[in-house]
Amino acid sequence: MTGIHSTYRPADWRPLERALENEFGTAAVDATAAFWFIGFSAGPADVGELRVYEHSVTRRRLALDRDGRAYRWFPEALTFSRVDIGEALVETLL
């Protein structure tokens, strides 16, 4: 994953909270404490900026748009593409 902005901006936790809540229920929102906010990255042109989080134990990253939809970095294409949020969360957590 490349292109994460290094200039300081406040962390945006709402997309991660929304994704966890939609997939696992309201109690799962507390799981945000297991993540670090890495920063913002340019997403697909029709989506805009993505928020990048890293799980503190697995060290796997999760890229979400402002609505909590998941994206994966495909280095061969040098771009992010949308992926299933449930699969992305499970992959990040395990």
Image: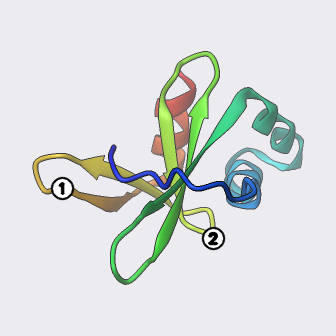
Q: Are marks 2 and 1 in contact (CB under 8 Å)?
A: no
State the residue at coordinates (49%, 69%): 49
- On screen, residue 85 versus residue 9, left or right, reads left
| Whole-percent x, y for residue 82 in the image | 37, 62
Q: Nearer the viewer, mark 2 or mark 1?
A: 1
Q: Secondary structure at mark 1?
A: loop
Q: Nearer the viewer, residue 70 or 3?
A: 3
Residue at the far top in the pictured view: 57
Residue at the far front in the pictured view: 7
Spatial distance from mark 2 to mark 1, Cα to Cα?
23 Å
Q: Considering only order in the chain, which callout, 1 or 2, is on the residue closer to the N terminus?
A: 2
| Whole-percent x, y for residue 24 in the image | 73, 44
- On screen, residue 60 versus residue 16, left or right, reads left
Q: Which residue is label 1 attached to?
A: 78
Q: Nearer the viewer, residue 92 or 42?
A: 42
Q: Is residue 11 above or below residue 59?
A: below
Q: Which residue is label 2 attached to?
A: 67
Q: Identity of the amino acid at label 1?
A: Leu
State the residue at coordinates (10%, 48%): 76
| Whole-percent x, y for residue 39 in the image | 57, 50
Disc 1: CA contacts within 10 A as few (<14), some (14-19) or many (>=20): few
Q: Nearer the viewer, residue 33 or 69?
A: 33
Q: Nearer the viewer, residue 90 or 75?
A: 75
Q: Identity of the amino acid at label 2?
A: Asp
| Whole-percent x, y for residue 62 in the image | 51, 43
Which corner quadrant of the image does residue 42 belong to? bottom left
State the residue at coordinates (53%, 47%): 86
Q: Quadrant of the N terminus?
A: top left
- On screen, residue 37 versus residue 45, left or right, reads right
